[in-house]
Image (tube, rainbow, N blue to C red):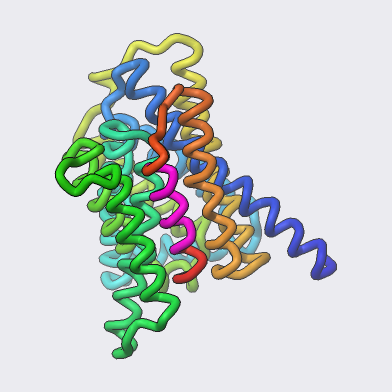
Amino acid sequence: MAKASKTTRGVVLTLIGGTCWGFSGTCAKFLMDGYGVDPVWLVCVRQFFASWLFLALAAAVPGDRKRLRDLVRELGRGWRTLALVAVTAACMMVNSVCYIVTVKVTNSATATVLQTLALVVLMVYSCVTARRGPRRRELAGLALALGGTFLIATGGDPAHLAMPAAGLAWGLATCVTYALYSAVPEGLLKRWGSPAVNGVTMLVSGTVLLVATRPWEGMPTFDAAGVAGVVAIVVVGTFLAYALYMQGVKDLGPLRASMLGTSEPIAATVFSALWLGTAFAPTDLAGFAMIIAMVYLTA
């Protein structure tokens, strides 16, 4: 494929993938507010069923099929790989729960933007492991991240919170756990590829939640729209979002893809406003813009 065509494909798929992610949070808010869906129930169903889509994708591609087979074999004889998969699955599970709870307490746009702050955590981690000080761009990004978080949390008035304290706490937990989930499986992804790794880790975390929560015992009452929402969050908001974004990373590289991935909080804001009628204060929008600008400085 010509370089220009590959770049165009990468840009389009990355933007669509980020938009699907933004749709995922808004869809989760729709299900939780409209049908009383429990956040942990939603995470369980989403991860368990999305895992089989990732495994099917891995099985359908010859190279990924071999990597999936090798990964499964390694799990049976290599305790280090087993431990790393278990830790990755735990990070994924905790991050997903924190994110969905943040969406429930606040809204999908705020939850997505707070999760984006994970780049700051990863920047600090990079500085510590490399034993270096932050660069000027990174310091500017840190200042934007702190300023944006301040505006979102307080509305510009330090005397009070403009969002529930629980929402801020869960949002910051989402940020930290997302940073862990981004860093922990790096070796696994390089060796076995994202379809195999995501399929296996989602299956592990989804199965753990399945056993722990027994979701069939607390089934929400859905109409056709509710069923469509659950299917959409599994297929579009989880499977397609990640598959398209990772193809974009492959075509463009992680730097350009992470910049285009800012379509996620933008999409979440638009979906929340148009679909759910969420109102955002000017300080919210200014805070979102500052954190998106932080991505361009620190990516």
Give the residue displayed 29% in from the left and 90% down from the top. 131
Q: Position of residue 222 (x, y in %)?
A: 40, 12
Residue 289 drawn above or below residue 41: below
Task: Determine which quarter of the picture holds residue 246.
Answer: bottom right
Quadrant of the image for the N terminus?
Answer: bottom right
Give the residue displayed 39% in from the left and 55% down from the top. 116
Give the residue displayed 44% in from the left and 63% down from the top. 294
Residue 299 drawn above or below residue 270: below
Whether residue 184 is visible to the viewer of this picture, yes or no, is: no
Q: Magenta segment: does it hold 289?
A: yes
- In depth, the one of 236 and 179 nearer the eye is 179
Task: Determine which quarter of the picture holds residue 138.
Answer: bottom left
- In depth, the one of 15 and 57 nearer the eye is 15
- In depth, the one of 50 and 133 nearer the eye is 133
Q: Is residue 196 left or right of residue 144?
A: right
Please give the range of residues in magenta. 284-294
Q: Magenta segment: does it hold 226?
A: no
Q: Is residue 57 left or right of residue 87?
A: right
- In depth, the one of 273 and 101 nearer the eye is 273
Magenta region, main secondary structure:
helix
Residue 106 drawn above or below residue 218: below
Q: Position of residue 89 (x, y in %)?
A: 31, 54
Give the residue displayed 26% in from the left and 61% down from the top. 87
Q: Position of residue 61 (x, y in %)?
A: 64, 56
Residue 114 drawn above or below residue 146: above
